[in-house]
Amino acid sequence: MTVTPDTVLWEPPADVLQTSRIGRYLTWLETERGLVFADYAALWEWSVTDLTGFWQSIWDYFEVVAHDPPEAVLGDAAMPGARWFPGATLNYAENLLRIPGRTDDETVVHAYSHSREPVRLTARQLRDQVRRVRAGLKARGVGKGDRVAAYAPNIPETYVLMLATASLGAIFSSCAPEFGVRSVIDRWSQIEPKVLVATDGYRYGDKAISRRAETADIAAAIPSIEHVITIGYLEAGGDWDQLDGDDPLEFEPVPFDHPLYVLYSSGTTGLPKPIVHGHGGILLEHLKTLALHHDLGPDDRFFWFTTTGWMMWNFLVSGPLVGASIVLFDGNPGWPDLNALWDLVDTAGITYFGTSAPFLMACRKAGLTPRKRLKGVGSTGAPLPAEGFAWVYEAVGSDLQLLSLSGGTDVCTGFVGGSPLLPVRAGVIAGRILGARVEAYDAGGNPVIGELGELVITAPMPSMPVGFWGDADGSRYREAYFDVFPGIWRHGDWITIASDGSCVITGRSDATLNRGGVRLGTAEFYSVVESLPEVVDSLVVHLDKPDDPNGELLLFVVLTEGIELDDALRGRIARELRAALSPRHVPDAAYQVRAVPHTLSGKKLEVPVKRILTGTPVESAAAKGALANPESLTAFADLAAKRE
């Protein structure tokens, strides 16, 4: 299939208003509120201008369980510091464990792993496990406001622990067990957890990896940890089963913005920012996005490939809020080959398959044709190029809805994505998500349409962070999002928004390629370079030169085994970039490297590489514990030394 950006690959079916959850929501708005919207654009416009009307409708439509009603919807709309639903008390775990539309005996958690046999939990079993673990935490002195940390993978125990912690009004934080000790200590020393729950290890494909020594080092380094509980995951044993008791399952009523969990920025430079998310904001945001955008409900089995160190885990495990069962997977997604996760679709009965854009592009490059009956495929983590869209519709299924979305740990959701009401076009994100007033700003802070601009959010969202942990005066929080455009959230991405609301994200604005004053996004660059069969991965950086307004554009490529970067391949790369993008995109130099540095959640690290190439020592340029492959930085340090 030959596609160009904007090629229509899927259109909403004629009966979409009768068959989708957003269609039923529109009917409810008409019946209950007297509101009628001609199309998605009109609905979105209302959702970001009448913030009170929209978010009250989400509260009412999904029948949020509250202990004390709110005094208002939005007490203060100023950013930062908007106050949502003041006076309300509720509990995220209580709302989730209702699991609407599901009976007690229906399976709601399907867990698969390279370390043990599959595990399934019914709604009744999930509630009972949460009750028992809650009692065990309470017996160890955990109460409202205390922190509970999990050094554990994407398995049912981690999920149960999060819900049990939330039920007490305590605060949860997780790190995937592949995180290095220094990286974990950097995160948790900031929040001072009382309890640490850790797996003894895990299996990645056919490789067993112990985590006993790492757990001991973490516990020794963080004095606040009073109890260490071990899950026998790699081997039998551990004392997880001792987190038990006879207390009934109860839910601590907490204010709307009471901390639910702490997520972290990637921490590739400096200490990771501890981003605090609240019970109410996450509850409303995930209800809205999972039901009205991903169209998930009681008939769905929802899967997203993620670790517990990425916000997509928090998003995935909210599935039961809307009645969906969830599919957890822990292991190497490429073992024994890239078909592993696609095979899981059949094994687990997945209806909605979520993954990252790099995974989809790797499957395309490998020539896979998995052909699955899926309702939807979700893609995030990086921009998905047009050929990635085409591959999904050619090789996976022609009648599914591909939802490419972008958001962040900062809001624990997407703010641009798809909708059952919008067509899917190659290389294009279908629209802005309800309740997210996303705009593109030029350098002067003016909104632009059809032009590249800074992605900003100009109205508050309930899932914007409560704050950063330990940031008493809010200065770190303001500096992170509000330092460029006062009162406006600046996210740090380049975005082009079309007149119809569709958009294209072209990479991080702090990794911009600026050639002679023309800003070039990195995403479109990678799309071209990595389409060449010889190129496995790539990274591009732009270095300023005082005597040259164009600066210096450097390309680094990882090639398939046995291939060398010679002049012929350099020439092909240059020709492809010139033809597909522009002469400005042709690099001044290209280098072959063994690996491109990635964070543990798969993001490329352009900025640390740029720092290394301009003289910053490796240990200062990036926190190695936050990288999937820290050894990859050595090649850039060697090159920096040679260039000097």
Image (cartoon, rainbow, N blue to C red):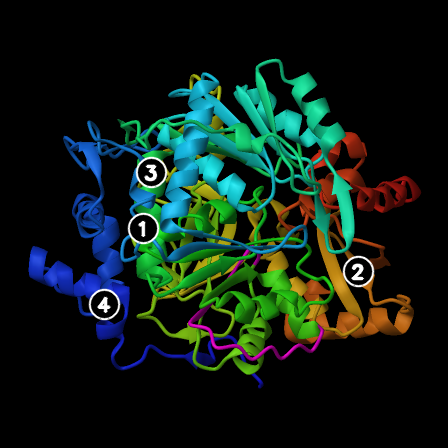
At x 41%, y 79%, the residue is 10
Q: Where in the figure is residue 504, as x and y percent of width and height?
A: 48, 62
Image quadrant in which the N terminus is located: bottom right
Please, what is the three-letter code of the amino acid marked with disc 3?
Tyr
Q: CA distance from mark 2 to mark 1?
A: 47 Å
Secondary structure under the numbered disc 1 in the rendered image: loop
State the residue position of label 4: 23
Query: In the rendered view, would you say 63 is above or below 5?
Result: above
Mark 3: few/some/many CA within 10 Å (<14, 14-19, 20+): many
Q: Which residue is mark 1?
A: 99
Question: Is residue 156 shown above or below 38?
Answer: above
At label 2, counting other C-alpha atoms closer than 10 Å, the crowd grade (few under 14, some 14-19, many 20 or more) is many
Q: Is residue 376 a member of the stretch shown in magenta?
A: yes
* Label of residue 557 in the image: 2
Q: Secondary structure at mark 4?
A: helix
Residue at coordinates 51% horizontally, 47% vertically from top-left? Answer: 313
Among the two numbered marks 4 and 3 on one chain, the one whose residue lies closer to the N terminus: 4
Secondary structure under tag 3 reads helix
Q: Callout 1: 10 Å neighbours few (<14), some, many (20+)?
A: many
Q: Mark 4 vs mark 1: which is more N-terminal?
A: 4
Q: Position of residue 236 (x, y in %)?
A: 68, 39
Q: Which residues are magenta?
A: 366-382
Place of residue 449 in the rendered image (x, y in percent of width and height, measured from the top left): 38, 60
Instruction: Compute the Cα span from label 1 to label 3.
Output: 12 Å
Cα distance between the residues tagged 4 and 1: 21 Å
Q: Are marks 3 and 2 in contact (CB under 8 Å)?
A: no
**Type of the residue with mark 1:** Ile
Where is the C terminus found, in terms of image quarters? top right
